[in-house]
Image: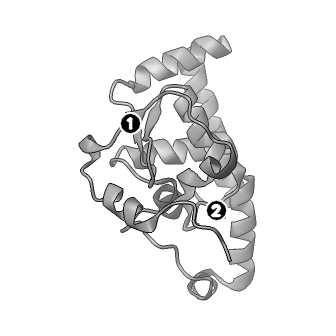
């Protein structure tokens, strides 16, 4: 028997609260023990991924299998870009983000997806709720220009060069995967 880490009734009650009534944080949080699983809790209404059978029918068994394996290899930067784009549409759980970005649940995408959210939080780009289901959102004061300038300064390059490298990397990923990952 698997122990219940989070009371489903409480998670449903919290999920029903308007976003402005939830408590949001940018501070470090405990991610040890069972707390590490808090960000994996799905919210009622989160999108569902396609079933294995639906994926196989849509793209073929071999291609679907390769895609699943490739997802786990996507870098933290690739996941961070996907998440930032999706979060422009409003707060979401990690599970909703991964289903929308890759048609895979949060427990299947590998550690880089989770690391991307923590990296975005450390960079001050996102914040999250302190209770489950954990929602993530872009920080209201985060400006892309300011973040680009900060990242460029940290790397010792110009913003123009940073953008150029990002375009090159995206083109490389598109060439490698045969499709735009975002």
Q: Residue at x 54, y 51 (%)?
A: 39
- At horizontal 50% and vertical 46% (from top left) the residue drawn is 83
- Characterize the local packing of mark 1: few (<14), some (14-19) or many (20 or more) Cα atoms within 10 angstroms: some
Does the rendering let one see residue 180?
no
Q: Quadrant of residue 164?
A: top right
For image coordinates 24% across by 50% down, the residue present is 18
Q: Secondary structure at mark 2?
A: loop
Q: Quadrant of the N terminus?
A: bottom right
Residue 164 visible (yes or no): yes
Q: Position of residue 175 (x, y in %)?
A: 68, 53
> Gap between marks 2 and 1, in whole Å?
23 Å
Left or right of 4? Residue 46 is left
Quick one: SS at disc 1? strand
**80 is higher (above) or lower (below) than 86:** above
Left or right: 18, with 69 as reference point: left
> 179 or 83: which is nearer to us?
83
Q: Mark 2 or mark 1, which has the lower sequence index?
A: 1
Image coords of residue 36 (percent x, y): 64, 48
Vertical side of 73 occupied by 144: above or below: above
Q: Which residue is mark 1?
A: 24
Residue that numbered label 2 is attached to: 107
Camera-nearest label, 2 or 1: 1
Give how far across and how far down residue 125 sits, in percent: 47, 30
Whether residue 24 is situated above or below residue 162 in the rendered picture = below
């Amino acid at each position: 028997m698997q122990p219940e880490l989070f009371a489903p009734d409480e998670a449903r009650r919290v999920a029903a609260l308007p976003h402005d009534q939830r408590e949001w944080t940018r501070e470090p949080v405990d991610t040890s023990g069972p707390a590490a699983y808090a960000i994996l809790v799905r919210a009622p209404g989160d999108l569902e991924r396609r079933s294995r059978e639906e994926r196989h029918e849509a793209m073929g068994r071999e291609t679907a299998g390769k895609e699943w394996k490739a997802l786990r290899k996507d870098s933290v930067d690739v996941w961070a870009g996907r998440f930032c784009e999706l979060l422009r549409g409003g707060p979401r759980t990690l599970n909703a983000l991964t289903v929308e970005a890759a048609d895979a649940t949060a427990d299947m995408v590998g550690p880089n997806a989770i690391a991307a959210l923590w990296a975005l939080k450390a960079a001050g780009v996102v914040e999250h709720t302190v209770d489950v289901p954990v929602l993530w959102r872009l920080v209201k004061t985060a400006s892309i220009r300011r973040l680009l300038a900060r990242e460029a300064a940290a790397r010792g390059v110009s913003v123009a060069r940073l953008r150029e490298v990002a375009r090159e990397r995206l083109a490389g990923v598109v060439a490698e995967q045969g499709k735009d990952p975002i």
